[in-house]
Image (cartoon, rainbow, N blue to C red):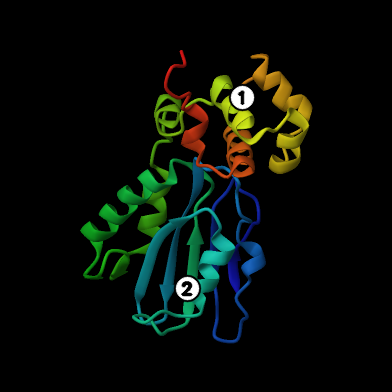
């Protein structure tokens, strides 16, 4: 195995794997709890076909592709994973459009042949990051009233919510008092604790201001 690998989110990963190597999954980024962010990736097989996509958990996703698919029953020879990106699903659309415009053959939505992986990597690196306004529009601001309503519906006090979500009771109290905002990680944890989607944390309900 050669190339550059990292398990941090700040840089991308490019791995070249020989026939004698065991795929180094540990060099791929670990899962991110950030619902607004994830990774773009390209898997290149020895057949020349490439699989393009996005994921919040590169290690698990690439394991699936390493096991093969009904279409591509070949060995991975190269794998590239981007740095962590906000609004990665929107960036995936640009990645697939670029691949479709530069490939010689396409199968279904995300399999391409004849692409230049180095050109793909350069293209993604030049994609501008999304604006803060775009991120806010996609992942609405957590509203105090929504948290309090969801707690009331379940009969939970703040320590109970802390136990379910993994967010400290002091952090929840500061949030409900309006003394701090909720990061996307906090919003994800709160939503998971309530068993709802992140969007539910921005919904107040009928009759509420």
Q: Is residue 121 visible?
A: yes
Residue 98: mark in rendering = none
Q: Earlier in the sequence, mark 1 or mark 2?
A: 2
Report x, y in % for residue 111: 31, 69
Q: Residues within 10 Å of mark 1 (few under 14, many from 20)?
A: some
Q: Residue at x 37, y 80 (%)?
A: 72
Give the distance between the C-alpha atoms of the residues marked 1 and 2, in whole angstroms.
42 Å
Of residues 204 and 177, the one drawn nearer to the viewer in this rendering? 204
Q: Quadrant of residue 173?
A: top right
Q: Quadrant of residue 98?
A: bottom left
Q: Residue at x 64, y 42 (%)?
A: 193
Q: Residues within 10 Å of mark 2 (few under 14, many from 20)?
A: some
Judge depth for marks 1 and 2 and give the one in front. 1
Report x, y in % for residue 11: 57, 48
Which residue position holds label 1?
148
State which quarter of the image contains the N terminus.
bottom right
Q: Residue at x 41, y 34 (%)?
A: 138
Of residues 120 and 168, the one drawn nearer to the viewer in this rendering? 168
Q: Tell how many labels.
A: 2
State left or right for residue 55 relative to residue 120: right
Report x, y in % for residue 87: 43, 41
SS at badge 1: helix
State left or right for residue 200 relative to residue 151: left
Report x, y in % for residue 84: 54, 46
Contact? badges 1 and 2 (CB < 8 Å):
no
State left or right for residue 3 relative to residue 108: right
State left or right for residue 71 relative to residue 54: left
Q: Is residue 182 visible?
A: no
Q: Is residue 64 above or below residue 120?
A: below
Residue 65: mark in rendering = 2
Q: Is residue 46 above or below residue 98?
A: below
SS at badge 2: helix
């Amino acid at each position: 195995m050669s190339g550059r690998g990292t398990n941090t989110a700040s840089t991308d990963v490019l791995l070249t794997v020989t026939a004698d190597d065991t795929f180094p999954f540990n060099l791929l980024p670990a899962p991110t709890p950030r619902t607004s962010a994830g990774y773009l990736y390209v898997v290149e097989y020895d057949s020349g076909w490439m699989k393009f996509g996005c994921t919040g958990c590169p290690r698990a996703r690439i394991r699936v592709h390493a096991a093969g698919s009904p279409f591509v029953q070949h060995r991975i020879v190269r794998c590239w994973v981007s740095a962590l990106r906000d609004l990665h699903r929107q960036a995936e659309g640009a990645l697939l459009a670029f691949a479709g415009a530069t490939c010689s053959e396409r199968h279904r939505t995300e399999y391409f042949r004849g692409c230049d992986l180095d050109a793909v990597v350069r293209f993604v690196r030049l994609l501008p990051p999304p604006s803060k306004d775009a991120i806010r529009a996609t992942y609405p601001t957590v509203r105090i009233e929504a948290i309090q309503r969801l707690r009331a519906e379940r009969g939970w006090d703040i320590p109970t919510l802390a136990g379910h979500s993994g967010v400290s009771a002091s952090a929840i109290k500061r949030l409900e008092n309006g003394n701090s905002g909720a990061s996307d990680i906090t919003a994800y944890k709160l939503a998971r604790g309530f068993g709802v989607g992140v969007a539910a944390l921005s919904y107040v309900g009928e009759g509420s201001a």
